[in-house]
Image: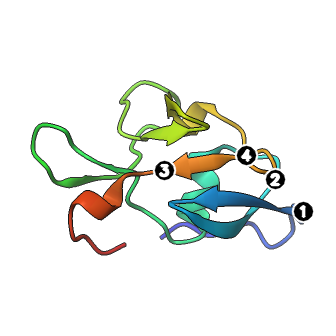
Amino acid sequence: MFKFDELTKNDKIEIILDGHAVLLPSGMSIAAALLGEGKIISRISPTSKKPCSPHCLMGVCFECMMEIDGVQRQACMTEVKPGMKINRHLEKENHHE
């Protein structure tokens, strides 16, 4: 569904996602970078316990909340930076991406 514009060449930078080193394109939000890589689940809803995905990508819906460098933040409002540690806490439930 989401894919990167082939004309745009973003450098890849390494981050830690859910405990694993991952290369993401620079110059975009974490949410956009993860969606482009096919990682559509952003978190598990604390109320329904079901997987959530970013919806608005402009900071309104809060469906992209993730632990970013130890703080709960909106991934759509946070730019990818080298060495970030991002945890979606998906291991609590058995969900597929």
Residue hosting label 4: 80
Counting residues from the start of the chain, the first of labels 1 and 2 encountered is 1
At a point 49% along the width and 26% down the height, the residue shown is: 59
Q: Nearer the viewer, mark 3 or mark 2?
A: 3
Q: Nearer the viewer, residue 3 or 62?
A: 62
Q: On residue 87, which mark appears? A: 3
Q: Position of residue 28 (x, y in %)?
A: 73, 46
Residue hosting label 2: 26
Label pair 3/1, CB-CB below 8 angstroms: no
Q: Is residue 64 rendered to the left or right of residue 23?
A: left
**Under tag 3, what secondary structure?**
strand
Q: Position of residue 89 (x, y in %)?
A: 36, 52
Residue hosting label 1: 11
Asked if 49 appears above or below 61 in the picture, the reply is below
Disc 1 packing (10 Å; few <14; some 14–19; many ≥20): few
Identity, as a three-letter code, of the amino acid under mark 2: Ser
